[in-house]
Amino acid sequence: MSDVAIRIENLSKQFTLGAGKVQHDTLRDQIAGGITSFFRSQRSASNGKPHTFWALTDVSFEVKKGEVIGIIGRNGAGKSTLLKILSRITEPTSGFADIHGRVASLLEVGTGFHPELTGRENIYLNGAILGMKKTEIARKFDDIVDFAEVGRFIDTAVKHYSSGMYVRLAFAVAAHLEPEILLIDEVLAVGDTAFQRKCLGKMGDVARDGRTILFVSHNMAAIEGLCTGAQMLSNSRLVHSGNTADVIAAYLSSFQISRTSLADRRDRKGDGDLIFTDVEFLAETGTPVEVIQSGRDMQFAVSYKSSKTDLRNLEISIDLFAQSGQCMLILNSEMVGTNFDTIPPTGRFTCRIERFPLAPGQYYLTLFCRVNGAIADWVQQAALLIVEGGDFYGSGRLPPSSHGGFLVAQDWNLEELTETAAGQTLVTPLTLSDNP
């Protein structure tokens, strides 16, 4: 018997931008589809042929049973499209993917759930889709509900669930109903930090049970900790495959060699009401610098442009990540109560930090902007920040990169403990000159 769980050969997927469904299931869909098709035909007549692009191009690799494979790459590389093809949500344009085993997938919030059914009914529905008997589902039911922490709402229609409740239950179902192959996209980012840790622990348990996992994530620490191998996609093609550490190194180095300006980056998300165009690191004098020293005052300066003249309720976030993918520092305007009343069409946000607290090393910046609750621009790995050792503590000693990721002010003292005849403990603070 073959030990291959997934075999992919020359898999390609082409999309046509603006193309709609050909088949309409209801009268409402037919009416809406007819109106949409009319306007599309008008645009096509004036703008020429519809634009097509390849989300995947000639991707080939094998995954053996029991392997945990990380799928990494920048936004738009084709990772989610690959999992959707493996989940039979969409069909490839060419090539094929053979899957040997029962598949459960968690690709986006609410995948596989019927909004009108309750949580309880959706658990049984998903189990039936996986080919499980009712007795098997019932045996796992309590574990699923306990893991998802939705016991109070288990008999409520899931359309009333928050996104966090949705993803907790969806992950619990996918992980507990004993699929032979588990496909997971970045959807875990919807949950809070405690839930993410809980999910990663469960995925480790699933992997130790000998089941096959394909895991898409931008969290390199999770990829490195969980995966036995990795595949890297770039611009729809498979460019690196093999040992997890080697593939992660190739992924991280791809950002360092990129010379694409921030304004020209295409792997961004958002409606474009505001676009980040540049980011600079400024020394305490206001001079642009390439390298920041620990313990020195500095500023992040993020330039932008906008075609809007009435932007309101802006939230700007600068997130710093270690090369492992671990978030080290979040600078967020809303979190500190900063309100931007009037936003000019072009400008620059600055964020000043006293005594920059990160240890020596290389960090990646992710830039994020929300306008009136909607994401305007979101660029991951927007810039590389190099931090050199500085006299953060004022001791004349420079902390090494192995010192840990974060530096904090510290105050050390020494106290002498002596026990009295009555059994009490006396605490005597000692000055430096008193130290033996």
Image (cartoon, rainbow, N blue to C red):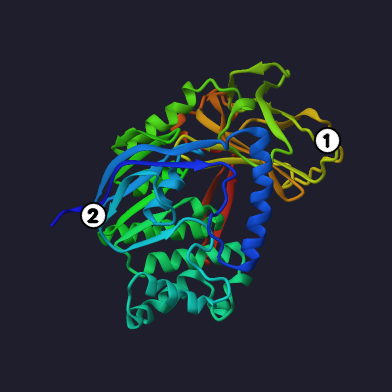
- Quadrant (top left, top right, bottom left, bottom right) of the N terminus: bottom left
Within 10 Å of disc 2 (Cα), the crowding (few <14, some 14-19, many 20+) is: some
Q: Residue at x 33, y 47 (%)?
A: 69
Residue 205: which disc?
A: none
Task: Using residue 241 as the reference point, say whether residue 351 is left or right of it.
Answer: right
Indicate the quadrant where residue 190 lies.
Answer: bottom right
In the structure shown, which secondary structural element does the residue marked by tag 1 occupy? Answer: loop
Residue 14 x/y as whole percent = 45, 41
- With respect to residue 147, does 15 lie above or below? above
Given residues 182 and 9, the one toward you in this image is 9
Q: Residue at x 85, y 36 (%)?
A: 309
Label 1 sits on what residue type? Ile
Residue 151 x/y as whole percent = 53, 78
Given residues 422 and 390, the one toward you in this image is 390
Label 2 sits on what residue type? Lys
Query: Is residue 330 in sight in this rendering?
Result: yes
Q: Which residue is mark 2?
A: 65
Counting residues from the start of the chain, the first of labels 1 and 2 encountered is 2
Q: Which residue is mark 1?
A: 343
Q: Residue at x 45, y 60 (%)?
A: 198
- With respect to residue 119, does 385 lie above or below? above
- With respect to residue 207, does 220 lie above or below? above
In the structure shown, which secondary structural element does the residue marked by tag 2 occupy? Answer: loop
Residue 271 x/y as whole percent = 68, 42
Residue 373 x/y as whole percent = 73, 51
Query: Is residue 353 in sight in this rendering?
Result: no
Q: Is there a contact, CB below 8 Å, between mark 1 and mark 2? A: no
